[in-house]
Image (tube, helix red, strand yellow):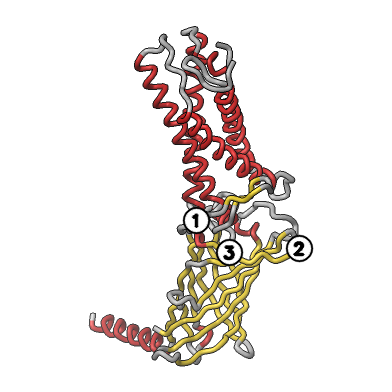
Amino acid sequence: MKQSFLAILFASLIILSFNLSAADYQLDTKDAHAFIQFKIKHLGYSWLVGRFNKFDGNFSYDEKNPAASKAAITIDMASVDSNHAERDKHLRGKDFFEVNKYPQAKFISTSFTEGENGQAILQGELTLHGVTKKVSLMVDHIGNGADPWGGYRRGFSATTKLSLKDYNINFNLGPESKEVELFISVEGIKK
Amino acid sequence: MSWRNSNTTWGSLSRVIHWLSAITIISLFALGLWMVDLTYYDSWYRRTPHIHKSIGLLLFFITLFRLMWLWLTIKPAPLQEHTKIEQILAKVTHGILYLLLFSLMLSGYFISTADGRAIEVFNWFEVSAVFPGIEGQEDIAGKIHYTVAISLIVVVSVHALAAIKHHIIDKDNTLKRMLGLS
């Protein structure tokens, strides 16, 4: 009894100390210093760019142990904005996102591998349109430090490419428009 | 046969507007159902919504004129053969038809103008967005547009069946008056 109590105490202390060294950050969506943009070729002749206006997430990053970093983002799929209400309505509907059935997309990281010059690879699982797949994000550490208002911030950008077919989105937009590129830029405020 | 309405029958102007509206409403319903399922590379993909919106807006102006005309001129009196209940039912149905028609046209307008874009009517003139859009306007308006369209076709069927009933079973002049045969 006494031993198991001590074991729990030690375990809690270890977790606590780990949490103290690894800083947790909340995405600054409130003041919109975080962006999720997508681009897809239109007919193969130009880029169509859009974004998601509502999402939330957090990450943890420890300079001493970057490999332990974690990130999670939840996106409100109905908040898609391609600067054309009729197209957004189409994207929310049965041909694309089916937001009534699948209101959210989720990314949860599984590993973080830091390389040179602040570059890293963040791997994780993306659930989109009810399908969960492994994705790999090319990450750039942009910067970190104190902000002018008493807080501490850290920011990353990330890119990845998704195939629409992988997520069971089969509306035919043409042979040049089967893949969508994501550009994610986030700033986290230290909790 | 006059182009104006009389106490006993519909004038040609009212009749032309009535049948033109009937054909237009049924065609737009079919066109609307068809166009939303077209594939991206279909040559009709961009043309059909343009035609649907253009004709829809023209029908709106024609319907406004139709109501004005109804208000300005006399309306033929109900047929003697019709019972009091039939007269009330007819009046209520006509009211519902107009109500659904305007809800349909307005909701359609609110889909396309949700982001402040104007609607082009056959590259002839533009109808601009009047109200600042609310969040999710295109989705809300879209649901209303669809539900009202189905409801309108149901009430149109009731209206048409009633006219056929008067013609075949009651053998009165209800349908003939609208066909210009009485």
**Residue A97 seen in render:** no
Which residue is found at the position 58% from the left and 16% from the top? B180
Q: Which residue is mark 1?
A: A102
Q: Is residue A1 left or right of residue A73?
A: left
- Between residue A109 and residue A143, name the one nearer to us: A143
Return the disc, 1 or 3, that comes first in the chain's sequence.
1
User: Is disc 2 placed on a helix, strand or loop?
Assistant: loop
Q: Is residue B93 left or right of residue B127?
A: left
Query: Mark 1 to mark 2: distance in Å?
Result: 30 Å
Query: Mark 1 to mark 3: distance in Å?
Result: 15 Å
Quadrant position of residue A180: bottom right
Same chain shared by disc 1 and disc 2: yes
Return the disc, 1 or 2, that comes first in the chain's sequence.
2
Q: Which subunit holds the residue at mark 3?
A: A
Quadrant position of residue A51: bottom right
Which numbered dot is residue A45? 2
Residue type at mark 3: give it: Lys
Q: Which residue is mark 3?
A: A133
Between label 3 and label 2, give the one nearer the viewer. Answer: 2
